[in-house]
Image (cartoon, rainbow, N blue to C red):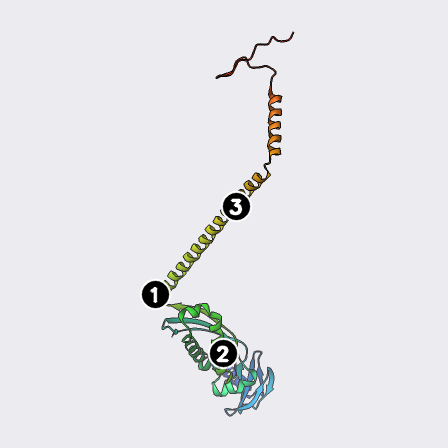
Amino acid sequence: MGEDMQFRWIKKLGLAIAAIIVLFMLTPFAIVPAGHRGVLTTFGKPSEQVYDEGLHFRWPLAQAMHLVGVAIEKGEGEGDAASKDLQRVQTRVAINYHVKPEAAVAVYRDLGNQPGERIIVPAVHEAVKAVTARYTAEELISKRAVVRDDIVAALKERMSRHGLVIDEFSIISFNFSKTFDEAIEAKTTAEQLKMKAERDLQRIEVEAQQKVARAKAEADALALQRQQVTPELLRLREVENQAKAIEKWDGHMPSTMTGNAVPFINVPAAK
């Protein structure tokens, strides 16, 4: 009796699950979530209408709603290429793109709803190799923004044919051979030493000019002083010197004179 009850319970559970599956398959509605567009197929054939986000009617079993993502997708990748001067370059890039909502049917039908694998990846590799070959290794570094713009232009032409739009494209890095990196480092060092030598030379020239200017100023000052020395000025200086000597005299006359000078006569001091 217990086994029969257990069997009946399992049977009911199975029937309930089967009923849920049937109801799910027979539901006449399909939901298109945010960030997607719907492509309705009737016995596998897609319609030309693009279904927006929301709830849509469909014929159970005969029709199915397939979702195509139209939100921004991000991809990164790297690949090898050769520069114009035949330097090996490994480039790492990042791209943000999305599917045009109105192109959802074409993306589902022509690209198998896999735009990243079928278009983005090969298109990026091809564009990077083609553009890299136009520039020398040094130009890839110095003209990075121009190189990026050229790659984007090449990608847009191909991607637009398949209903894809580039939102952002970035060159993450350029990696060169060890020999080339060492050559660039040596060149950079030489340029820095050259700039330092030029700055030192400019400093020396400026200091020399300053010395010449100071010497000229001193010479001009001496010349001006000579022009200002007149007989009247000399007499004035002589009078000033005599006045200073009188101020310093203590009132006593010297008793003897050195050399051939005649000694002064001793004059009794006044009482």
Q: Which residue is mark 2?
A: 153
Say which label, 1 or 3, has the lower sequence index: 1
Residue located beneath label 1 in the image: 179
Amino acid of disc 1: Thr
Crowd band around label 1 with a 10 angstrom C-alpha radius: few (<14), some (14–19), many (20+): few
Q: Are there few (<14), some (14-19), or many (20+) residues within 10 Å of tag 3?
A: few
Residue 116's place in the image compared with 211, above or below, is: below
Q: CA distance from mark 2 to mark 3?
A: 64 Å
Crowding around mark 2 (Cα neighbors within 10 Å: few <14, some 14 to 19, many 20+) is: few
Q: Residue at x 52, y 45 (%)?
A: 216
Left/right of residue 54 with respect to residue 213 in the rendered view: right
Q: Judge by depth and name the residue closer to the eye, 246 or 21.
A: 246
User: In the image, residue 115 lies at what x, y percent?
Assistant: 48, 81
What whole-number distance in Å separates the C-alpha atoms at marks 2 and 1?
32 Å
Type of amino acid under label 3: Lys
Percent position of residue 161, x then y? 50, 85
Quadrant of res 40: bottom right
Please tell me which residue is depicted at 58% across the width and 40% down the height of the picture.
227
Q: N-terminal of the two: label 2 or label 3?
A: 2
Asked if disc 1 and disc 3 are in contact, CB closer than 8 Å, the reply is: no
Of helix, strand and loop, which one carries label 2? helix
Q: Mark 3 sits on what residue?
A: 216
Q: Position of residue 51 (x, y in %)?
A: 58, 86
Which numbered disc, 1 or 3, marks the residue closer to the eye?
3
